[in-house]
Image (tube, helix red, strand yellow):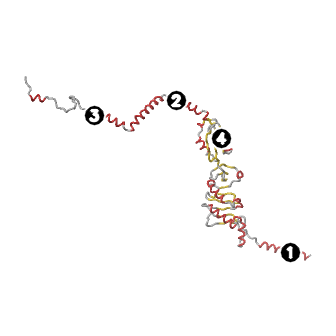
């Protein structure tokens, strides 16, 4: 039998290890202390706010929507749910606390009052949910006579309407009739005759209604001649003529008519211009005022100049011919002579 020598025994001795160290099992792989790759990525995703909201809110909401969609996929269940909700809403809206029983209107004339009651979209009593107050207010303010209306539902089932009507300030006469206008030029109503509102001034001509504010300013400035004022006429949709009694006119320029009118009034105060035989004071060119005098004044000037007078048609009147008068005188003399001859013969 072969005997082992001392060298072979030395090779089989256990390895030397440090004090306190645990012996490792033979053949087992060493495990890393950190998390796995998947666990690390999931942990990093969870630290992001977006993913946390998605899992905490998005996922439950998705599940709820999915369940609701599966429930409402059936037509019968949808019809039953809709009918139940409609019946519940009707019961709530039909309660006495939400019912409007009467309509109270303040500050409106009889015609506007009647128009407002006719514009109510429902027949009273009705639920306040059936009355759209903003839409009704917009519809009422489309009336020409209404400037503003305040709508509200008061306790006790009262629909209150406080109306502010437009105040007529001027009459506008045009080819289509006569209309009442307020100070801003907004139409108020139509009238059939000037006598219905004889207290209001009159403006005439196309485009005069849109410039009612300017016309009222001119009327306010015509204080001294206001009793003689018959109205204002818009000429060519660009300028004004002040029409006075006795057929007189003050023709104002298109630009800055108020200073031109004040200039005409100053001339009248200084010289009594408008009390004379003047047909028109033309101020269309403020630097060169022009006067158009009447027929009597024209004939007086023409007589002073030795010119023939003008007739009502504007034509010169031919002077009477002296020849017929002389011929008549001669004929009279001859007749006398002839008449005298028979007397002498007798």
Report, in whole angstroms, how far the alpha carbon at label 1 lies from the one at label 3: 170 Å
Which badge, 4 or 2, is on the more N-terminal residue? 2
Q: Tell me, yes or no, whether the two marked residues, 2 and 1, touch with CB atoms within 8 Å.
A: no
Going from N to C along the chain, the mark reached first, 3 or 2, is: 3
Q: Camera-side residue: 123 or 62?
A: 62
Q: Can you tell which quarter of the image residue 62 is in?
A: top left
Rendering coords of residue 243 (x, y %): 68, 59
Q: Are marks 3 and 4 in contact (CB under 8 Å)?
A: no
Is 302 in front, or is 8?
Answer: 8
Q: CA distance from mark 3 to mark 2?
A: 59 Å
Q: Residue at x 61, y 58 (%)?
A: 238
Q: Quadrant of residue 225?
A: bottom right
Disc 2 marks which residue?
A: 81
Instruction: Specify whether residue 239 is in view.
Output: yes
Q: Which residue is mark 4?
A: 104
Q: Which residue is mark 3?
A: 33
Residue that numbered label 1 is attached to: 336
| Label 1 to label 4: alpha-carbon separation | 102 Å
Q: Is residue 123 something one can see in this rendering?
A: no
Out of 160 and 130, give the one closest to the viewer: 160
Q: Residues within 10 Å of mark 2 (few under 14, many from 20)?
A: few
């Amino acid at each position: 039998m072969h005997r082992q020598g001392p060298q072979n025994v030395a090779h089989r001795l256990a390895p030397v290890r440090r004090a306190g160290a645990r012996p490792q099992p033979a053949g087992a792989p060493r495990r890393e202390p950190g998390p796995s790759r998947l666990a690390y990525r999931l942990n990093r995703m969870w630290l992001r706010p977006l993913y946390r909201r998605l899992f905490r809110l998005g996922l439950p909401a998705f599940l709820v929507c999915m369940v609701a969609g599966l429930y409402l996929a059936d037509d019968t269940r949808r019809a039953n749910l809709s009918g139940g909700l409609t019946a519940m809403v009707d019961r709530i809206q039909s309660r006495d606390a939400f019912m409007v029983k009467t309509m109270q209107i303040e500050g409106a004339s009889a015609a506007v009052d009647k128009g407002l009651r006719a514009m109510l979209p429902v027949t009273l009593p009705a639920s306040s949910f059936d009355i759209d107050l903003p839409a009704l207010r917009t519809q009422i303010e489309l009336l020409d006579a209404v400037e503003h209306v305040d709508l509200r539902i008061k306790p006790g089932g009262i629909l209150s309407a406080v109306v502010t009507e437009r105040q007529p300030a001027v009459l506008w006469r045009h080819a289509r009739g006569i209309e009442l206008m307020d100070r801003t030029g907004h139409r108020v109503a139509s009238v059939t005759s000037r006598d219905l509102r004889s207290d209001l001034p009159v403006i005439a001509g196309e485009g005069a209604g849109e410039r009612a504010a300017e016309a009222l300013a001119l009327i306010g400035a015509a204080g001294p001649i206001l009793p003689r004022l018959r109205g204002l006429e818009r000429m060519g949709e660009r300028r004004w003529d002040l029409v006075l009694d006795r057929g007189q006119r003050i023709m104002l320029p298109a630009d800055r008519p108020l200073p031109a009118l004040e200039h005409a009034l100053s001339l009248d105060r200084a010289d009594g211009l408008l009390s004379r035989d003047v047909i028109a004071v033309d101020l269309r060119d403020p630097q060169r005022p022009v006067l158009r005098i009447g027929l009597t004044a024209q004939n007086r000037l023409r007589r002073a100049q030795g010119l023939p007078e003008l007739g009502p048609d504007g034509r010169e009147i031919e002077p009477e011919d002296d020849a017929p008068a002389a011929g008549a005188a001669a004929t009279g003399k001859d007749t006398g002579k002839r008449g005298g001859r028979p007397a002498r013969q007798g």
